[in-house]
Image (tube, rainbow, N blue to C red):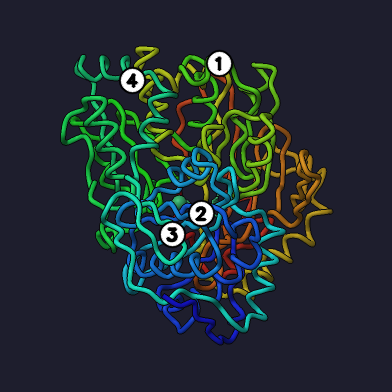
Amino acid sequence: MTVREIATRPYDDQKPGTAGLRKSVAVFQQPHYLENFLQSIFDNMPQWSAGTVVIGGDGRYFNREAIQTAIAMAAANGVAHVIVGQRGHLSTPAASHLIAKRKADGGLLLTASHNPAGPDGDFGLKFSMAGGGQAPEALTDKVYAYSCEIAHYRILEAGPVDLDQLGQQSFGGLRVEVVDPVDDYAELMQSLFDFDRIRAWLADGHSVCFDGMHAITGPYAQRILVDMLGARADSVINGTPLEDFGGGHPDPNLIYARPLVDLMMSADAPDLAAASDGDGDRNMILGRGLFISPGDSLAMLAAHLDKLPGYRQGLAGVARSMPTCRAVDLVAAAKGIEAHETPTGWKFFCNLLDAGRVTICGEESFGTSSMHVREKDGVWAALAWLNVLAETGQSVAEIAKAHWASYGRHYFARHDYEGLDSDVAKRLIAAVQSALPELVGQSFGGWTVSLADSFAYTDPIDGSSASNQGLRIVFGNAARIILRLSGTGTSGATLRLYLERYEKDTDKLAWDVGEALAPLAAIAEQIGSIRSRSGRDAPDVVT
Ligand code: VG1
Ligand code: CO
């Protein structure tokens, strides 16, 4: 087996976004494209030399080939030990856990998350640090700069690794260890939650439905819910991971998980339903007849978490991304603990988690997780809800109503305008940004602007800062309008408009979300002229 040094030419578009590098499969299949990016990572991660790297992906089209390439390049770049999920599968939270548990020096996660898969779909790659958190921006910027200059990459010329065979193989000087993707993760979940109580609750006639959306979480849900907790065999739907995710869009929200939503609005609804995304880090939670918005789910879990075994010592603090509704802040205030507001993207939570400052964190984009890993975690959120239901004996609706009665309710929605021309989107943001200074003090429909700025963040642990993280127009505690551009798309630009309205009077807690937010949407239009500037009559997706 020989290590070959291959001459290559740089691509100029390998800049990672909110969570890794995402491109269409066709882009990744260009000659040396994947190799260039991988070599740029290896050369900026000297700690991987002679170290251990965890590798796995969400099973989408091109996953197996990409993993073979990653292993062959790890061997050529002096990595001593690679831990890889069987069949190349690892959910993002399971990979994060393995990195921490096995004290690996980092990881390569082959995924484009919730983006559609297949030959015409997307592919992606995120890389993680020791501890299991995604690479910080300063490092991804270095990797990008390197990729713009790259001239060679190194690869071991050898036959493929057998990804199906569990156990150790040697590959040149590299030790390759193929592990069951679910084992360690299932053990971790068992250490956090009261499996006996959940099992008894299910045996008592309660039911759950988990939608794997034909992506990575099916085997995790099958093992934990059905095999370990005794849920009915039909509790996991779309549970077989497919290379094209069954042709669907594995994004667990009201639009793309519509069949699950319809089930929960029907007479056959189980007590709890949950869905996850392509790589298993997102979650959607539904009760019978009721959708729990991600911001509410974060707040409600924060309120109840200390009843669950892994969290009985209480919460150190909470964190949410800036556009996420402020419901969890009220729980933190009631508990007298810290509440942090970070930019969009899970990597911004990692320092807070490492420092023990926060126990639970979440994003409005269907992301929730805790200090148990350094990624968001879809299956964890479903199990946390199950445990809360089993522990309190209440239904999802009872938990939600009691929560709103004591804290008030944050109505929230996100409007996405997809596939905009990048220049059009940038001009729109620039125009709104330049109007911000005059907004403060102005009133719109009874709400007065208390703050209007471009969100900037300084990390309280390492002092690093991030600016231009979204425009926010804040109406005291009553409402917020936020605008930002997506950093995960693979074509054109996506404008995200986030609307939040807070009500605490008892007769205002059961409104229709769309109706509650309609006046704010009108104000956003008045301030931002989104329709005329984007040339669109309405958003493409409302979640
Ligand atoms: C989106 C979400 C963000 C999330 C990111 C990665 O980013 O808004 O909250 O962390 O996706 O999620 P953006 O820049 O497109 O708004 V995942 O599940 O795709 O890794
Ligand atoms: Co994801």
- Does 499 sit left or right of 286 as displayed? right
* Residue 510: % across, % down: 45, 27
Do the CB atoms of the residues marked 2 and 4 lie less than 8 Å apart?
A: no
Ligand 1 closer than 8 Å to the CB at disc 1?
Answer: no
Amino acid under disc 2:
Val
Residue, disc 4:
195
Location of residue 281 by image quarter: top left
Q: Residue at x 51, y 57 (%)?
A: 80
N-term mark: 2 or 3: 2
Q: Which residue is mark 2?
A: 53
Q: Which residue is mark 1?
A: 406
Please say if 231 is above or below 526: above
Q: Nearer the viewer, residue 282 or 4?
A: 4
Q: Residue at x 31, y 19 (%)?
A: 198
The amino acid at mark 1 is Ser
Q: Position of residue 100 (x, y in %)?
A: 53, 40
Please identify, in this view, whether the residue under mark 2 or under mark 4 is nearer the observer.
Answer: 2
Q: Residues within 10 Å of mark 3 (few under 14, many from 20)?
A: many
Of mark 3 and mark 4, the one earlier in the sequence is 3
